[in-house]
Amino acid sequence: MSEGYALLGLTHVDGRRFILKLGGVEALCVDGFREGNIISELEVVSGSDFEAVGISPGDVLASLEALFLRPHQSAAEKYHAAYDAFRDKQLARLEAGTAKLVLLEPA
């Protein structure tokens, strides 16, 4: 696999197999997903109106915080401030449409 790509091998309910290739990947978090899971929802979020696709701004921020981990609570304030600035920049990129957030929900 090349850097910046994620490949997911999937099987359609009718048995067809395919690969979902995500390019330009900056961060990946796989949580609660197991082999054999059914994908109940696949959302690609970009642009300023997250709620139009059923995702709250809080969910977007929580997703960013899962992708880009916050410094340990005992870290110096400058690291927390830098993290907040970075997270806000990522959010601004999503809102501007220059980045996308892909959410895959297992059943």
Image: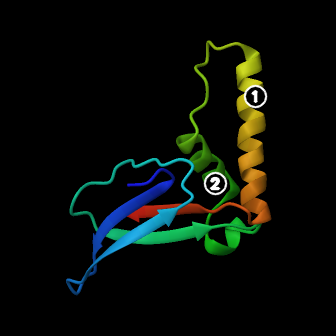
Counting from the top left corner in percent of width and height, residue 39 is at: 35, 69
The residue that disc 2 covers is 60
Q: Identify the residue at horizontal 75%, vertical 56% (top origin).
A: 93
Query: Mark 2, residues whose alpha carbon is within 10 Å: few (<14), some, or many (≥20)?
Result: some
Relative to 59, does residue 12 appear above or below in the rendering? Answer: below
Q: Is residue 63 left or right of residue 51?
A: left
The residue that disc 1 covers is 82
Counting from the top left corner in percent of width and height, residue 36 is at: 21, 63
Counting from the top left corner in percent of width and height, residue 91 is at: 73, 51
Q: Identify the residue at horizontal 53%, vertical 47% (top origin).
A: 27
Q: Residue furthest front?
A: 2
Q: Identify the residue at horizontal 77%, vertical 18% (top origin).
A: 78
Amino acid type indicated by mark 1: Ala
Q: Is residue 49 left or right of residue 35?
A: right
Q: Secondary structure at mark 2?
A: helix
Location of residue 88 (image quadrant): top right
Q: Give 3 or 58, whichever is nearer the viewer.
A: 3
Q: Quadrant of the N terminus?
A: bottom left
Q: Quadrant of the C terminus?
A: bottom left
Check if mark 2's residue and mark 1's residue have beta carbons within 8 Å. Answer: no
Which of marks 1 and 2 precedes in the sequence? 2
